[in-house]
Each structure stands twice: as structure tokens, then as C-alpha cells.
């Protein structure tokens, strides 16, 4: 099957050198994921309803006594928000895995870490942030003492960002597994504990009138660490899941 | 400038079974290489290895003479891979799907170009319908529209004819041949019988 | 050094050399554990605060030490496997995970046993025990993840990534839990937060720690050898070995 070089010297098919366009790709991925999630508004509301339901369970299961609830409210709110955020993680990469888009993401000439980070950012925007904004309402139901509502929302906003990042690693590792959802929770919950400690701690410090700066600073530091390291772990984990 | 994808002594083991061993493969500009074999013989696995998605294999890959590890970026910039699943998001319209794929390679592209590509695969009039409402064949056509829309030299296609009707099959075949004749190369697996052509070569697995 | 690493690539070489090393570690383990146990349980002086019950540290502290260092070793093995693709490193990591989990359980159990005479309760959410419990969950996660994949290579790589993520988190978790504990409890005595221990108290402790390590290394070598045989079962050298021993 000899082809003369004269025929190939002016190919109609161009050979490309790698070109950048990272920003274009990231913006497009952000837009795509936002569009997809907003078109399924029901799914965006689910974690919020779950949050409210879990908070409802506690007074029923423990005691409706406002003083008792007030004393444990920070922890309850944080744990319930954490679980609600965890629930929504499983679908972070699953639909892309199922319809073949994940393969394409891996083959894009862009760093997978950056694209993964874009997806996690959308997840936080549509899950973590709404949970943080809704929490003060549920705080009222648990007789959360005054002066801690703003800290509640702020600590949750900061904390859920870390939770999204750490949880995305677990989601990436388990996306290819049949019943990956339960395993995801087992893998990710131990890693959530530091965020929980400082997040709930911040709210409690606000209640007792102590300084909250240290807690928020540590939450910020945890977020910074997660932002630096998680994207690479997410990319490596996605490649492993596609492999399997 | 001609292209060349080479595999040397490729071997892949899955579940304690060797899918293939000692496989040598060359794909050059102007060729359509068809991988054949019964179900489960490792055709999809081979395609995934060649397109750089699987790393659990032995042997070496070369792109234009360089080891794949070093030439990976250049390879990816010239590769268009369409897998078993069409990679079409059900919640987006065909236009939005194509726009994202173009953006992934860093191009903004243009709406008219995307509409033309969709028209070329017979989806004119469906540009804004959410892809979830399209049939399986129509969803695959959205994926195939990328062949027209994004100019890439190497096409790696896994069962591209799935769910396509007879007209579509003939059109796609012609597109593959035209691509090869203008200097591109195609690596394809399919159960469908391709018409013989001087650019067509076959490799048997299993 | 590179020659050594290249030799490690061959499970057969590892199998041969571990055959020679194993007995050494078993002997060391037996001696050290015997000396340490007898010294610690019988001859070390009675603690003025806790009486005889403090002697549990001769089991608890080495187990806790080991539980943490095994996780680190497991993460390092995982890293070696991912970066240099040395299969033996993955086999070692596979084998170490259940050993580490068992060691963590021993640490938790001995900690709980210590709790009975000290606090009057079988469980106390103090910083050490809580951190140990979280460590146990991390171990279980790695074991579960490795087993969940149908492709062994994918499972190994996933477990390696998780182990590395876990190892980075361990100091963070410890710091957080320590902070949390001191916030919620009045300053109390912590299990090993003791000031100067006399030499007759910590010498047997050191011996026990070394004994536990030797035991762990011997056990790891032994189990890695079985793992090698299992994975390489269809290789010629394994078949020849099986025929030889028959």
C-alpha cells in the first residue's frame, strides 16, 4: 500500500500542535455543569430537604426541650449539613461516567485537575452554599442562641467547600463501582472529622462569646490545603476508575 | 507530514486471562485499520490502551516515532476518540454538547459551524432538543458530528455504527474513507461489514 | 541503590531473600517480647498513681505506635507502587493493611481495658482513643476499597491513593482531635502524657516496642511470601517450587 509522498505533501487533514485554551475549557465546564444541575432543580433541592428532615429527627429522637437542643445545636447542625453534602457527592461524576463523557474529559488536552476542580466548584455552589444559607433557619428550630447565626453560615460555607473537595476524591475513587455510594461514605467520613471539629467549634465559640477567628482561620487553612492537593488526587482517582 | 501510531509487544491481562500478547501494530496516515474479533476478545481494551486511557498493560506505544510518554500532549491534540457510550449529556441540547467538546480543546467555535455539523449528520431541526429526548441513534449522530466539526488527524472509533440506520452507515463509511484519503488515519472496531477499499486493513484479535 | 530497587521488581528475588530474613525477625521478636513482657509485668516498679494497672502500657503503647507507623509504611509502599510500578510494594501494602487494622484494634482494646480501673468505664472519648478509632476507620476504608474493584491493579492503585490521602490527614486529624479534647475536658491525665518515667519503667517499654516491630516485620514477610505465591501462581518458578516441596 504505497503512497507517494507527493500525495501526502499537502494533506487536507491538519496536524495540530497542542494549544492552550485552559480558561475556555474551564469556563465551558463550569457553564455546562451549572446548566445541567439547574435544569434538574429537584435534585438541587434534595440535599436541602434532607438537611431539614435530619434536623427534625433529633428533637423527635432526643427531646424537644429547647435548652437541651440549644446546647447541642451547633453539632447537630454541622453533622446534618455534612451528611447532606455527603449524600449529593455520589452523583458528582456518576452521570459523566455512565454516558461516556468522563472518558472524553480524560482525553481533553487540558489538565484534568483543573477541569475536576471546576466540577467541584459547581457542586459546592449548588450544594454547600445553599446548605450554609439555610442553616440559620434550622438553627432557629433548634433554639440556637443568638450571636452565632452568622458564624454558623460562614463556617458552613467555608467548611462545605473543603467537604466538597475531599468528598470528590472519594467520589472519583468509587464512581466505577456498582454500589459505590455506601463505600464512598465510609471512605470520606473519617477525613471529614477535622472540618467538623473546627466548624462546630467556631459556632460554639460564638455562643460562649469567645474568639472565633482562630477557628475560621483553621477552616480557611484546611480549605487552602484541600485546594492545593485535592485536584491532583481527584484526577488520579478518575483515571483509576476509568481504567477498572 | 505523515502520522504514525505504533505499538510494540503490547500485552494486556484481565482477570487472570491474557487478552492479547506480543501485539505489534502500526497505523499510518491514509489508512483505515479495522480491529476484528469475537465479543470479549479485547477490542475495546485495545482501543483504550492505544488512546491512552488504560495504563494496565505491557509493551510500548510510539507516536510519530517518539515514546508516547513524551509525545502525549501532541498525540491528544490530534486524537478524536469516540467510545462505546456516545458521551452525550442527556440534559443538554446537541448544540450545547458540541460547544462543550469544542471548548475542551480550547476552541470557542461558532454556532453556525455547529449547526452545519449537525445538519451534515441528519439532525437539522433537532439542534435545541434536549439530547435525552433523542433516540439512541440520534444521540450517536451528535457524537459523530464531532468528526466533521473538529478537525483531527487520528480517529479512534469504538463501534461507531451502533444504532445508525443504513443511510447513516453509508454516509459514515464514506466519511471514513475520505478522511483516510486526505491523509488522516482511522482505527475502528465494528461488527458491521465495511466495504472493501484500498485504504482498509484488518487486524484480528482473539 | 537502583540495583536494589530493580531487584525488588522481581517477586522471585523477594521470596528468596525473605526466606533468609524471616527467621531472624521471628527470633528477635520472641526474645524481645519475652524479655519485655516479663520485665514489664513482673519486675517494673509499681506506679504510685495507678498501681499495677498502668502495666497495660506495655501492650497499649507499642500497639498504638505500630498502628500509626504501619499506616505510614502502607502509604509509602503505595507510593512506591504507583510511581515505580513495583508489584512487591503493592503486595506488601496489601498485607500490611489488615495487620495495621488488627494492631489498631489491640491498641483500642488495651486502651479500653486500661479505662476500667482508671476511669471506671470501658470507653472514654479521650484524644488518643478517639484518634485511634478514626485510624481504624481509615484502615477499614483502605481494605474495603481495595477489595471493591474487580481488576486487582485498579484496586491496588485506588487503595494506594486512599492510603496517601489518609496519611496526609492523620496529623491533621490528631491535631484536631487533641484540640477538641482539651476544649471539652478539664485538663486530666492523658494515657502517655506522663512526665519523666524512670528508666526501669521505660526500658521494658522500649523493648516491647522493638519486639512488636520485629513481630510485625516477621509477620509481614511471611504474609507477603504467601501473597507472592498466590499472585504468581502460574509462573514457572512457583510451579517448580511446588513440585520441589512435594
Image (tube, helix red, strand yellow):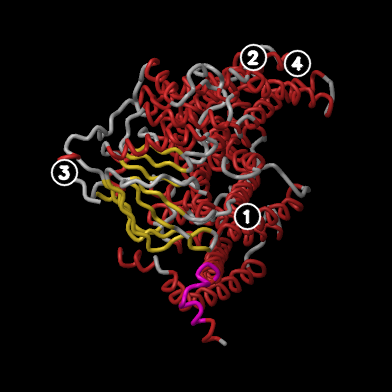
Pointer 2 residue: A149
Mark 4 to mark 2 CA distance (whole Å):
11 Å
Left or right relative to B88: residue B194? left
Does label 2 lie on the same chain as label 3?
yes
Q: Secondary structure at mark 2?
A: helix
Residue B41 lies, with reference to residue A42, above or below; the image says below
Does label 4 lie on the same chain as label 1?
no
Name which of mark 3 and mark 2 comes first in the sequence.
3
Label 1 close to label 4 by CB (< 8 Å): no
- Provide the chain ID for the residue under circle 1: C
Pointer 3 residue: A5
- Provide the chain ID for the residue under circle 3: A
Residue C240 lies, with reference to residue A133, above or below; the image says below
User: B27 or C46: nearer the eye?
Assistant: B27
Name which of mark 4 and mark 2 comes first in the sequence.
4
Q: Comparing marks 3 and 2, which lies closer to the viewer?
A: 3
Quarter of the rendering containing residue C104 = bottom right
Pointer 1 residue: C104
Q: Residue at x 33, y 55 (%)?
A: B25
Quarter of the rendering containing residue A207 = top right
Question: Which segment did they paint magenta?
Answer: C230-241
Mark 2 to mark 1 CA distance (whole Å):
39 Å
Query: Looking at the rendering, in which quadrant would you find the C terminus of chain C?
Result: bottom right
Q: Secondary structure at mark 4?
A: loop
Residue farthest toward the left in the current orientation of the protein: A6
Query: Looking at the rendering, in which quadrant would you find the N terminus of chain C?
Result: bottom left
Label 3 close to label 1 by CB (< 8 Å): no
Left or right relative to B146: residue A151? right
Pointer 4 residue: A143
- Provide the chain ID for the residue under circle 2: A
Amino acid at each position: 500500500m504505497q503512497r507517494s509522498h507527493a500525495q501526502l505533501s499537502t494533506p487536507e487533514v491538519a496536524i495540530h500542535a497542542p494549544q492552550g485554551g485552559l480558561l475556555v475549557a474551564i469556563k465551558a465546564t463550569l457553564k455546562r455543569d451549572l446548566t445541567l444541575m439547574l435544569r434538574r432543580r429537584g435534585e438541587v433541592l434534595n440535599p436541602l430537604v434532607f438537611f431539614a428532615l435530619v434536623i427534625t429527627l433529633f428533637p423527635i429522637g432526643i427531646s424537644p426541650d429547647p435548652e437541651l437542643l440549644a446546647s447541642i445545636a451547633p453539632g447537630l447542625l454541622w453533622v446534618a449539613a455534612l451528611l447532606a453534602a455527603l449524600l449529593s457527592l455520589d452523583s458528582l461524576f456518576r452521570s459523566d461516567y455512565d454516558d461516556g463523557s468522563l472518558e472524553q474529559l480524560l482525553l481533553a488536552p487540558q489538565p484534568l485537575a483543573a477541569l475536576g476542580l471546576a466540577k467541584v466548584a459547581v457542586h459546592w455552589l449548588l450544594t454547600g452554599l445553599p446548605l450554609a444559607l439555610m442553616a440559620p433557619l434550622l438553627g432557629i428550630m433548634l433554639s440556637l442562641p443568638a450571636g452565632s447565626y452568622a458564624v454558623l453560615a460562614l463556617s458552613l460555607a467555608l467548611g462545605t467547600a473543603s467537604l466538597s473537595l475531599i468528598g470528590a476524591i472519594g467520589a472519583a475513587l468509587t464512581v466505577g463501582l456498582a454500589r459505590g455510594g455506601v463505600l464512598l461514605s465510609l471512605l470520606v467520613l473519617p477525613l471529614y472529622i477535622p472540618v467538623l471539629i473546627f466548624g462546630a467549634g467556631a459556632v460554639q465559640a460564638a455562643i460562649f462569646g469567645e474568639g472565633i477567628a482562630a477557628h475560621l482561620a483553621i477552616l480557611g487553612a484546611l480549605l487552602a490545603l484541600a485546594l492545593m492537593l485535592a485536584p491532583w488526587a481527584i484526577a488520579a482517582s478518575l483515571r483509576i476508575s476509568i481504567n477498572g | 507530514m505523515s502520522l504514525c501510531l505504533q505499538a510494540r509487544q503490547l500485552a494486556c491481562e484481565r482477570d487472570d486471562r491474557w487478552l492479547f500478547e506480543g501485539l505489534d501494530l502500526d497505523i499510518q496516515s491514509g489508512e483505515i485499520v479495522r480491529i476484528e474479533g469475537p465479543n470479549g476478545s479485547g477490542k475495546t481494551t485495545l482501543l483504550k490502551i492505544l488512546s491512552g486511557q488504560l495504563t494496565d498493560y505491557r509493551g510500548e506505544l510510539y507516536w510519530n516515532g517518539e515514546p508516547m510518554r513524551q509525545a502525549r500532549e501532541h498525540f491528544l491534540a490530534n486524537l478524536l476518540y469516540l467510545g462505546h457510550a456516545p458521551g452525550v449529556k442527556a440534559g443538554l441540547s446537541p448544540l450545547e454538547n458540541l460547544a462543550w467538546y469544542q471548548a475542551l480543546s480550547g476552541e470557542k467555535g461558532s454556532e453556525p459551524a455547529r449547526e452545519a455539523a449537525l445538519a451534515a449528520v441528519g439532525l437539522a431541526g433537532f439542534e435545541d432538543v434536549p439530547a435525552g429526548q433523542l433516540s439512541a441513534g440520534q444521540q450517536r449522530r451528535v457524537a459523530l458530528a464531532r468528526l466533521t466539526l473538529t478537525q483531527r488527524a487520528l480517529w479512534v472509533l469504538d463501534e461507531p455504527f451502533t444504532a445508525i440506520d443504513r443511510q447513516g452507515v453509508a454516509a459514515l463509511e464514506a466519511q471514513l474513507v475520505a478522511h483516510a484519503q486526505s491523509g488522516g488515519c482511522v482505527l475502528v472496531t465494528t461488527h458491521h461489514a465495511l466495504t472493501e477499499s484500498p485504504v482498509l486493513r484488518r487486524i484480528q484479535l482473539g | 541503590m537502583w540495583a536494589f530497587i530493580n531487584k525488588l521488581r522481581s517477586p522471585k528475588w523477594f521470596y528468596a531473600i525473605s526466606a533468609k530474613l524471616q527467621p531472624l525477625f521471628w527470633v528477635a521478636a520472641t526474645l524481645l517480647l519475652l524479655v519485655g513482657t516479663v520485665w514489664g509485668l513482673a519486675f517494673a516498679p509499681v506506679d504510685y498513681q495507678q498501681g499495677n494497672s498502668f502495666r497495660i502500657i506495655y501492650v497499649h503503647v507499642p500497639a498504638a505506635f505500630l498502628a500509626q507507623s504501619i499506616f505510614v509504611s502502607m502509604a509509602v509502599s503505595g507510593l512506591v507502587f504507583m510511581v515505580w510500578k513495583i508489584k512487591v510494594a503493592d503486595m506488601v501494602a496489601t498485607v500490611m493493611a489488615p495487620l495495621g487494622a488488627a494492631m489498631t484494634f489491640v491498641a483500642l482494646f488495651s486502651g479500653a481495658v486500661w479505662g476500667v480501673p482508671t476511669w471506671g468505664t470501658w470507653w472514654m472519648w479521650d484524644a488518643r482513643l478517639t484518634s485511634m478509632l478514626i485510624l481504624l476507620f481509615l484502615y477499614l476504608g483502605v481494605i474495603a476499597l481495595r477489595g471493591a474493584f474487580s481488576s486487582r491493579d485498579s484496586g491496588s492503585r485506588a487503595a494506594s491513593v486512599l492510603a496517601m490521602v489518609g496519611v496526609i490527614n492523620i496529623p491533621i486529624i490528631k491535631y484536631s482531635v487533641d484540640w477538641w479534647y482539651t476544649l471539652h475536658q478539664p485538663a486530666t491525665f492523658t494515657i502517655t502524657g506522663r512526665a519523666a518515667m524512670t528508666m526501669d519503667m521505660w526500658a521494658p517499654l522500649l523493648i516491647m516496642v522493638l519486639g512488636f516491630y520485629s513481630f510485625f516485620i516477621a509477620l509481614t514477610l511471611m504474609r507477603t511470601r504467601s501473597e507472592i505465591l498466590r499472585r504468581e501462581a502460574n509462573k514457572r518458578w512457583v510451579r517448580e517450587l511446588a513440585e520441589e516441596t512435594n
